[in-house]
Image (tube, rainbow, N blue to C red):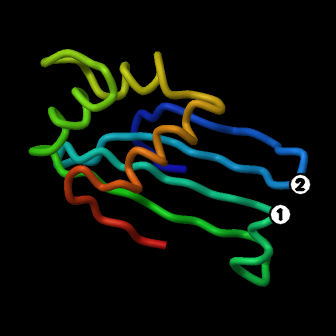
Amino acid sequence: MTGRPLVVLRDLRLENGLHTILEASLTADGSLELEAQDLGGSACLMNSDGEYEYWRTIVPEHLPALVALLGGRPGDDILTLLARDWTGYRSFDLEALLRDEPFPLRLFS
């Protein structure tokens, strides 16, 4: 969804008809951006065109805390960590952790 290098964390079609996509990339300022798009299924409840998009951004100063929260070690690359441990259905666990907002993040939908 962006021109930056990215990790596809989720591209799933669920039994309820929902096609859910979640991608992670780093912005020019070093922030982590999680971009999600839900199509069909329950997304129809959010928007009449059956599409819902949202972005979560975590600024660079909070990335070490995120790496630790996700089980990484100091100096681990966040995109590598996400690709290794947080793809497919595990990406829903990632979003649940972020909903608890252990540190500030920006949300746009």
Q: Position of residue 21 (x, y in %)?
A: 64, 47
Corner quadrant of residue 107: bottom left
Left or right side of 21 for 9: left
Quick one: label 1, few (<14), some, or many (20+) residues within 10 Å?
Answer: some
| Residue at far bottom of view | 48
Q: Is residue 99 above or below residue 95?
A: below
Instruction: Please give the name of the residue rendered at 39% of the width and 40% of the height, measured from the top-left corner.
Output: 25
Q: Secondary structure at mark 1?
A: loop
**Dot 2 corresponds to which residue?**
17
Instruction: Please give the name of the residue rendered at 48% of the width and 49% of the height, measured from the top-left corner.
Output: 2
Amino acid under disc 2: Gly
Q: Position of residue 90 (x, y in %)?
A: 57, 30
Amino acid under disc 1: Gly
| Residue at far front of view | 100
Q: Earlier in the sequence, mark 1 or mark 2?
A: 2
Q: Position of residue 60 (x, y in %)?
A: 15, 44
Nearer the observer, 102 or 55: 102
**Dot 1 corresponds to which residue?**
40
| Residue at far left of view | 61
Q: Secondary structure at mark 2?
A: loop
Left or right side of 81 for 52: right
Q: Position of residue 52 (x, y in %)?
A: 65, 69
Q: Is residue 47 above or below residue 67?
A: below
Instruction: Please give the name of the residue rendered at 69% of the width and 38% of the height, measured from the top-left corner.
Output: 11
Q: Is residue 88 above or below residue 104?
A: above
Nearer the observer, 101 or 78: 101
Corner quadrant of residue 77: top left
